[in-house]
Image (tube, rainbow, N blue to C red):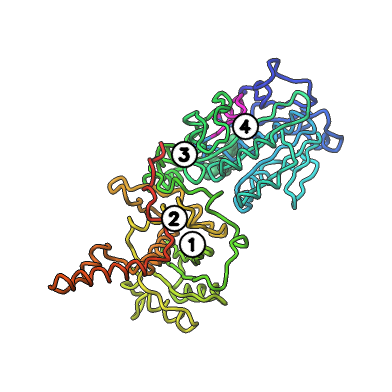
Amino acid sequence: MSATIQSGLDRWLNDGVPGADCIVEDTADAMTIADAHLDASALALADESSSRLVLPYTPFPRQQEFHRSPAKYRLFGGAAGPGKSKALLMEAILQAHEHAGANSLLMRRTFPELEASLLLYFRRDVPRELYRAFNDTKHVVSWWNGSTTRFGYSRSENDIYQYQGAEYLFIGVDELTLFTLKQWQFLTSRNRCPVPGAYANMAAASNPGNIGHAWVKSLWIDKQAAPGMERPAEYDPEDYAFIPARVWDNPIYATDANYLKTLHALPEHLRRAFLDGDWDVFAGQYFSNFDPARHVERAERIGFADWWPRWISMDWGFEHPAAVYWHSQDKTRTVTYREFVRQHMSPRNLAHEIVERSRGERISNVYLSPDAFARRTDETSIAEQIGDVLAANGLPRPVPADNDRVGGWLLMYQMLDAGEWMITENCAELIRTLPSLVRDSARVEDIEKMDGDDAADAARYGLKSRMRLQTGANAPFDQRIAARVTSSDPTIRAIQARKAELDEQRRSGPISFARHHPRPGTPLR
Ligand SMILES: Nc1ncnc2c1ncn2[C@@H]1O[C@H](COP(=O)(O)OP(=O)(O)OP(=O)(O)O)[C@@H](O)[C@H]1O
Ligand SMILES: [Mg+2]
């Protein structure tokens, strides 16, 4: 028989079992819930020998450690596969049974993610007789003791405010690094419970990486206030506990050679993050200034005007996904407003998809990854095949994109810094990719190539090629001036130089891209 689990109880009650009407404990092979409030119909379905409903969950040792932690804010995991999501779900269920009439909330960033993890486990692993009802539209479970557990998500930054007005004894956030600090902070304000004796608390599960990497690492790993916290002096490290767990802590996967092989085969930095749970691996995060709260906006709030120029950039791929972005620009900002990312699509089909999505828009340029001009799938190059379809539908043929990687990344960084690049929230792949890009350790000005960077490459083509078009600039300024000073007569040389300078200034006049911003800052710890 394994140790008794009284989830939460021994975290805040010295005498173990509170005066509440339910207890939670585990038996030799399963955790059970006994609840004096259960009505006859529920009891009839219960385990006959014990008159107890059986929750088929025997936590693994690391999961037990997580359930037992007394911290107000717990973070579980830090690597792939140890049973983080399942432990979060079970924690919510256990707490719902410790206090009758208490609400709990389980969050993921998007609904598809919620469906594929927490909701899937709820439907699969929680016997129907354990709860009174499940509202499939609102995703709320009503337990027999009057408690509820809600499954929620917050796709956009501000969707989190739909939880305003509610109060939850327990809030569990799965894949916390997909959330922003603001979203987490807002949820902490909903974490309270009027039930006497109840101790409001939160827990999260996550792997390293992604947009929330820096603040999550600060709070739980480095144990210090996170950058962007409004009242850093109020940060109390005692409130935060990190319970590390890795794939070997889950007996199901620990011996699954196939899954372990997949994890081992990941690119170096992802392998270190997901297999080893190494939080330092994203130390070289390139776009450390990317902040969805500042750089991501709903498309309808941009206020596009007909006269804004629009252009498309594309990174061709077949085995790797092809990524396509649509951009537009007003006087001060460039807006990347649509994305299309798809694998295993022929050049012509890809072009048809682009045509379909560009209807009614005046597209001035299409920039395509330079390799598409060299590679062929039949007698014509990929660029020609795409171009034929685009041209037949009134769109420009693609031209080779500017593939200056170092200059392109730097431009993107600077534009983010100056607030001159916005991304609309429907560009989910790009928003997910930017924070995961890290510096190339051998060439620190560049970003390390990795699987899944196609979205960033395609966006870079769009910004950098546009910049080149506007400045007409491939060669440095001095070189371009020098090239136009051809006379041997000193007076004429001076006139030629002056004229060239004036032309350059005129041409680069309307450019609003920041050029004097600092280089990407100090890497994250
Ligand atoms: N205590 C347990 N008993 C039996 N099966 C479990 C237990 N904990 C987790 N599992 C199973 O192990 C698998 C992985 O669990 P889970 O999805 O919770 O892991 P995770 O750490 O969230 O993984 P990921 O890193 O992919 O998000 C699931 O099939 C889950 O049902
Ligand atoms: Mg999970």
Q: Are marks 1 and 2 in contact (CB under 8 Å)?
A: yes
Disc 3, SS = loop
Residue type, label 4? Thr
Q: Which residue is mark 3?
A: 255
Q: Are marks 1 and 4 in contact (CB under 8 Å)?
A: no
> Residue at coordinates 45% horizontally, 59% vertically from top-left?
455
Answer above or below: position of 12 versus 220.
Answer: above
Disc 4, SS = loop
Disc 1, SS = strand
Q: Position of residue 52 (x, y in %)?
A: 77, 30
Decide which of tag 4 and tag 2 comes sooner along the chain. Answer: 4
Q: Nearer the viewer, mark 4 or mark 2?
A: 2
Count of marks overlaid on the render: 4
Q: Is residue 73 found inside the magenta-colored segment of the image?
A: yes
Q: Which residue is mark 4?
A: 58
Q: Quadrant of ligand 2?
A: top right
Q: Residues within 10 Å of mark 1 (few under 14, many from 20)?
A: many
Q: Position of residue 283 (x, y in %)?
A: 39, 40
Extreme front residue here?
491
Left or right: 50 as drawn, with respect to 216: right
Q: Nearer the viewer, mark 1 or mark 4?
A: 1
Left or right: 186 as drawn, with respect to 247: right
Q: Nearer the viewer, mark 3 or mark 1?
A: 1
Q: Residues within 10 Å of mark 2 (few under 14, many from 20)?
A: many
Decide which of tag 3 and tag 4 comes sooner along the chain. Answer: 4
Q: Which residue is mark 1?
A: 334
